[in-house]
Image (cartoon, rainbow, N blue to C red):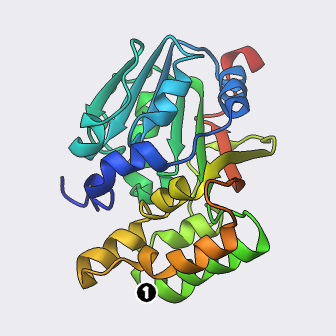
Amino acid sequence: MAGFKDHFSGVAEAYRAFRPGYPVALFSWMAAVAPGTDLAADLGCGNGQAAVSLATYFAEVVGVDPSSEQIARAEQHPRVRYVVAPAERTSIPGGTVDLALAAQSFHWFDPEPFRVELQRIARPGAVFVACTYGLCRICPEVDEVVDLLYGDLLGPWWPPERRHVESGYQTLPFPADELEVPRFEIAEEWPLEQFLGYLGTWSAVGAYRRATLQDPVGEVIPELRKAWGSAGARRQVRWPLVVRAGRVGGAAPSEG
């Protein structure tokens, strides 16, 4: 697909295995503010993690992603169907979507074509939600090693779109009339091996590996093991979750 920057097809299986989950409270809140619960769209759905969670609250969910590798490995659910397509050209019928979600994917979209497509697929008063999480925090000793990997080793290898994640999506034009959003957080209890797998899914890690044939995560493993503590120890990993949400085309019909 023209313009598609494929950073994740090569790690599609790892992405499914090692990425953190989103809080249940986020999906409950989205269902409550949407004008209905007939159809939700997970745009840039990746492995379908968010799509399956949406299916708890919506009668039908369509997961859309330009990566055929991600879609091939997406989690299956009877109320979720997947489409290989960019968010700017979804093939979803017009005026049908109650909720459109971009979970850690909004920074990859082409803003103006996406705005037009969102307006096309949204029913009156539909809600668009874009959420993103940046650097996780564990404890000062581990955080210091993670910061070294993120900045010193991988700084030149991050794609330019990463700046939008670091800004909490404040550097992107938002295509809906914004709503007030509660505070959300991602939290997991992970052993070190799970955490190392997660680090391996970073787009900059993939770029570094392809260009140098070296593994930047491997360079910090000794320091991480020392900072993590005893073998098999599980630590709480937290990501502050930034959520922007808004009505597409204004208020929902029930709001007058």
Name the residue furthest front. Answer: 231
Q: Is residue 146 something one can see in this rendering?
A: no
Q: Is residue 249 above or below residue 17?
A: above
Local crowd size for mark 1, using a 10 Å CA cut-off: few (<14), some (14–19), many (≥20): few
User: Which of the two residues, 154 or 162, is positioned nearer the viewer here?
Assistant: 154
- Residue 196 percent across, percent down from the top left: 50, 62
- Horizontally, residue 242 falls left or right of residue 176, namely right
Which element type, helix, strand or loop, lies under badge 1? helix
- Residue 255 percent across, percent down from the top left: 76, 20
Residue identified by numbered label 1? 156
**Which residue is at a point 56% across and 62% down the rendered structure image?**
172
User: Which of the two residues, 184 or 195, is positioned nearer the viewer here?
Assistant: 195
User: Given the image, on which type of amino acid does mark 1 rest?
Assistant: Pro
Q: Is residue 40 above or below residue 210?
A: above
Name the residue furthest left. Answer: 1
- Residue 202 percent across, percent down from the top left: 44, 64
- Horizontally, residue 183 falls left or right of residue 54, namely right
Quadrant of the rendered structure where residue 78 is?
Answer: top left
User: Which of the two residues, 247 or 61, is positioned nearer the viewer here?
Assistant: 61
User: Which of the two residues, 214 or 256, is positioned nearer the viewer here?
Assistant: 214
Q: Is residue 121 above or below residue 200?
A: above
**Which residue is at a point 40% across and 49% down the rendered structure image?**
15
Quadrant of the rendered structure where residue 99 is?
Answer: top right
